[in-house]
Amino acid sequence: MGETFRAAVLRLVRAVPPGLVTTYGEVALMVGAPNHARQVGAVLHGLKESEDDVPWQRVVNASGGISTYKVGSGELQVALLRAEGVEVVDDRVDLRRYRWAGPGEPVGPQPTKRSAPT
């Protein structure tokens, strides 16, 4: 029998490196369940105490926004991200700079500006 949706989400979120983020929709897509972003949020909201190794704070909404204020943990998410070196400005993360592309992709913040060719 294959991996459950919940187990796949937890496995993938555990793989997001410190200092980077992904979105609920990207997690859903990477686990093979496109259009299930809300269900990803539900899985993360329902984490058990024994699952404290899941870096839920590294998952943001599609525009880079912190949407956990609705469930009472927005301030904690911002604090945890900042502690990892992620800039959060006006409750948003710059996805161009901090987006994690998935397993096997390069890790680390990406520059926001590119130099003009010389």
Image (cartoon, rainbow, N blue to C red):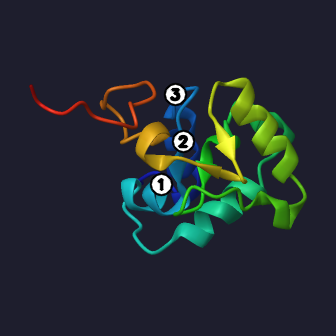
Residue at the location (68% across, 46% down)?
A: 89
Amino acid type, callout 1 = Val
Q: Where, by quadrant of the figure, is residue 1 drawn?
A: bottom left
Q: Is residue 18 above or below residue 11?
A: above
Amino acid type, callout 3 = Pro
Regarding mark 3 in the picture, which secondary structure is present there? loop
Q: Specify the farthest residue to the left.
A: 118
- Using the numbered discs, state the Cα–Cα distance from disc 2 to disc 3 in whole angstroms: 8 Å
Q: Is residue 36 above or below residue 13?
A: below
Foreground residue among 65 and 32: 65
Q: Of the numbered discs in the image, which one, if any, rests on residue 102?
A: none
Q: Is residue 12 above or below residue 43?
A: above
Residues tagged 2 and 3 counted as in contact (Cβ below 8 A): no
- Using the numbered discs, state the Cα–Cα distance from disc 3 to disc 1 in whole angstroms: 14 Å
- Using the numbered discs, state the Cα–Cα distance from disc 1 to disc 2 in whole angstroms: 10 Å
Quarter of the image with the C terminus in it:
top left
Amino acid type, callout 2 = Val
Q: Where, by quadrant of the figure, is residue 78 drawn?
A: top right
Q: 20 left or right of 73?
A: left
Q: Residues within 10 Å of mark 1 (few under 14, many from 20)?
A: many
Foreground residue among 93 and 16: 93
Residues tagged 3 and 1 counted as in contact (Cβ below 8 A): no
Q: Of the numbered discs in the image, which one, if any, rests on residue 21?
A: 2
Residue 92 spot, x, y in % from top left: 64, 52
Mark 1 or mark 2: whose residue is earlier in sequence: 2
Residue at image mark 1: 27
Residue at the location (44% across, 57% down)?
A: 26
Q: Of the numbered discs in the image, which one, if any, rests on residue 17?
A: 3
